[in-house]
């Protein structure tokens, strides 16, 4: 049976929980689109996150990879379009590192696009009643660092891969008045569908851009 790799991060930025890992581990061991889901937790640490990713890719040999990260303040499941070759941290990572204007991969290309059918995934999620959108930026913190490193490692290998940001859990949003959130069961159901579409769907031509 083929494997699908899903990754989440440990808590960062003063949070006690990271919804990306709670979500990933909730899906661990499930069978989606005829393949087994393998969940791996990655540290929110520049460099080390990619070392752990390398170990997971070698061990799991996935047919598809979906990396997930927390984006407090976002209101939906955000399928990222592009990863850029820059680390520029507004806050320190969990090891205290705070790189500024450094490349993820020295002499690497300026950017990589997701190889997931992101617009088909967004359309499928919306049709099923889940809030979703295409995002044009994964930021410049460890999420983008991982996304870029993932696409760099799998470039040309024919393995669909990409990154999705998710909102806070309700218990986190309670400490951030006004911040949107989605409950874990909703995130699990939506991501289960997103992973199925990531494996089976063909990309569609549909509007997904932004004005600013």
Image (cartoon, grey):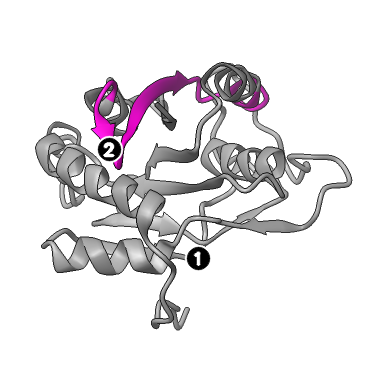
Q: Which residue is mark 2?
A: 32
Q: Which residue is mark 1?
A: 136
- Judge by depth and name the residue closer to the eye, 84 or 155: 155
Q: Quadrant of residue 110?
A: bottom right
Answer left or right for 182 relative to 191: left
Residue 6: x %, y % from top left: 40, 32
* Residue located at (52% from left, 59% from top): 137
Q: Which label's residue is closer to the chain start, 2 or 1?
A: 2
Answer left or right for 154 relative to 107: left
* Residue located at (65% from left, 20% from top): 51
Residue 64: x %, y % from top left: 48, 40
Dot 1 falls on a residue whose secondary structure is loop
* Residue located at (78% from left, 43% from top): 103
Q: Is any part of residue 75 visible from this angle?
A: yes
Whole-Å distance between the Cαs marked 2 and 1?
A: 27 Å
Dot 2 falls on a residue whose secondary structure is strand
* Residue located at (18% from left, 52% from top): 180
Would you call the spot at circle 1 few (<14 residues within 10 Å), some (14-19), or many (20 or more)? Answer: some
Which residues make up the magenta segment? 28-50
Q: Is residue 20 above or below residue 201?
A: above
Q: Is residue 59 above or below residue 204?
A: above
Residue 44: x %, y % from top left: 51, 25
Q: Quadrant of the N terminus?
A: top left
């Amino acid at each position: 049976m083929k494997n699908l790799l899903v990754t989440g991060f440990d808590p960062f930025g003063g949070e006690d929980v990271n919804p990306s890992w709670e979500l990933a581990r909730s899906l661990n061991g499930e069978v989606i689109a005829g393949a087994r889901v393998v969940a791996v937790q990655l540290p929110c640490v520049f460099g080390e996150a990619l070392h752990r990713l390398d170990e997971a890719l070698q061990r799991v040999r996935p047919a598809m990879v979906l990396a997930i990260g927390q984006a407090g303040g976002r209101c939906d499941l955000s399928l990222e379009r592009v990863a850029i070759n820059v680390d520029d941290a507004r806050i320190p990572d969990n090891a205290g590192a705070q790189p500024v204007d450094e490349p993820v991969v020295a002499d690497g290309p300026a950017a990589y696009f997701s190889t997931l059918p992101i617009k088909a995934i967004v359309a499928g999620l919306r049709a099923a009643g889940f809030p979703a959108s295409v995002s044009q930026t994964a930021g410049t913190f460890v999420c983008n660092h991982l996304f870029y490193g993932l696409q760099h490692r799998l470039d040309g290998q024919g393995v669909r891969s990409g990154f999705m940001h998710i909102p806070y859990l309700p218990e986190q949003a309670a400490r951030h008045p006004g911040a949107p959130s989605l409950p874990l069961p909703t995130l699990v159901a939506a991501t289960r569908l997103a992973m199925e579409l990531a494996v089976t769907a063909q990309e569609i031509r549909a509007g997904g851009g932004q004005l600013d």
